[in-house]
Amino acid sequence: MTKPLSGIRIADFTVHNAGPFCTHLLSQLGAEIIKIESAMRPDAFRKPHPVYGRMGPATFDQVASNKLSIRINLKKKAGVDLAKRVVALSDIAAESFRPGVIGRLGLGYDVLSALKPEIIILCVSSSGQTGPDSHFAGYAPLFGAWGGLGEMTGYADGPPVEMRHVMDHTVGMNSAVAVMAALHKRRATGRGSLVDVSAREVASSLLGEALLLAAAGHTPHRTGNDHPHMAPHGVYPALGEDRWISIAVASDAEWRAFATILGAEGDDPRFAAADARRTHRDLLDEIVSRWTMTMDANAAAERLQAAGIAAHASWTTLEIAADPHLRTRRAIVDVAEPDGKERAAVGVPMRLSKGSDIGIERGTPKLGEHEDYVYGDLLKMTKVERQRLEDEEVIY
């Protein structure tokens, strides 16, 4: 079965999470990803991340499955020359360094496009490749904070919420869309492109109506789980430690069904109409919470759904990893970590018809695992040449 991006090859210089998640998605759609690292400077996410509570790689196996791995020491001129040879056999080169770094290495768009005019170059950075703030480095929490998304996320009486992987992954998904647009353009014109993705601008693009309100002279505020029209609407405590259920009542008919479940407290005339429920939403939330606290979250959700009310337990990652529905759709699959252990990983969140079996096919690559294929089969390097480059710590 042919995947939609079969035949597309990407030289992947990206590091950390945002850029690697982009190429990870493209790999599941069929692109061949050659990840370029070195023993001197492996991807930071190959390393233990105790901040996430794990001494094994906390993220690398979630963004590197399906990829091929080779070593190139880009601090040496011969390493840069070798990288150019890999790019010359590729359709796309992707990087996520601070603007200017890839150019100083000798692998900027001007150099690579001269080498191969049809090449597509993806540059993922904090604030883009141009503009007065382009020199800023950044990680996921900065993207959300500077882009304004953090300011609009959280409770009204609390601070802005720091966002990590969700910000990186959203940047990666936007980057993947932009790359596929560049591929479409190349198919039509034969010309390559520089794809410049600003993570901070991705965050701002998600603000939606908050920006419209601000442009109209209003001051948007954090609203937590509140909703401008629905009540009840929120996440409510359920039976057990740290168990929660999300409930959203969108109409008077849904409220009447919910009121029947709540019993006497649901008959309060102050809750009969939507505007009144909004006015008395704090009292309503207390009543709903008293009911949900006596119920198992999954059982409560099932009962509410049967009555036509949108509700679901707030699932833990363990529940998600074991979910038969996600397993059947291969949205959750098991992959091998570099140490050989298996763990659940997130697959591509889409399905295509006509026999395109997209998704993860193999686990996380060991550093340099696929050099026989890349240096031997693709670049036709002799054993003598490879050994010389290893001795000179170019392949290192």
Image (cartoon, rainbow, N blue to C red):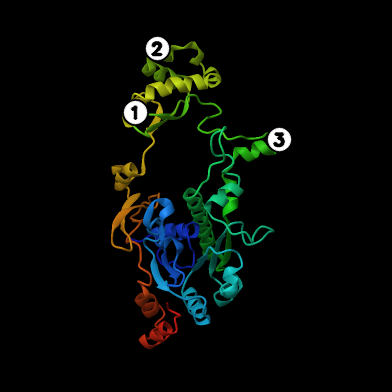
**Horizontal and vertical percent position of residue 330:** 32, 50
SS at mark 3 in the image: loop
The 10 Å Cα crowd at callout 3, few under 14, some 14 to 19, many 20 or more, is: few
Q: Amino acid at mark 3?
A: Gly
**Horizontal and vertical percent position of residue 236:** 42, 29
The 10 Å Cα crowd at callout 2, few under 14, some 14 to 19, many 20 or more, is: few
| Residue under pointer 1 | 239
Q: Is residue 246 above or below residue 268?
A: below
Say left or right for 363 vs 234: left
Q: Amino acid at mark 1?
A: Leu
Nearer to the camera, 32 or 230: 230
Quadrant housing residue 384:
bottom left
Mark seen at residue 264: 2
**Horizontal and vertical percent position of residue 180:** 50, 59
Residue drawn 32% across and 44% down?
318
Badge 2 or badge 3: first in the primary sequence: 3
Tag in front: 2 or 3: 2
| Residue under pointer 3 | 217
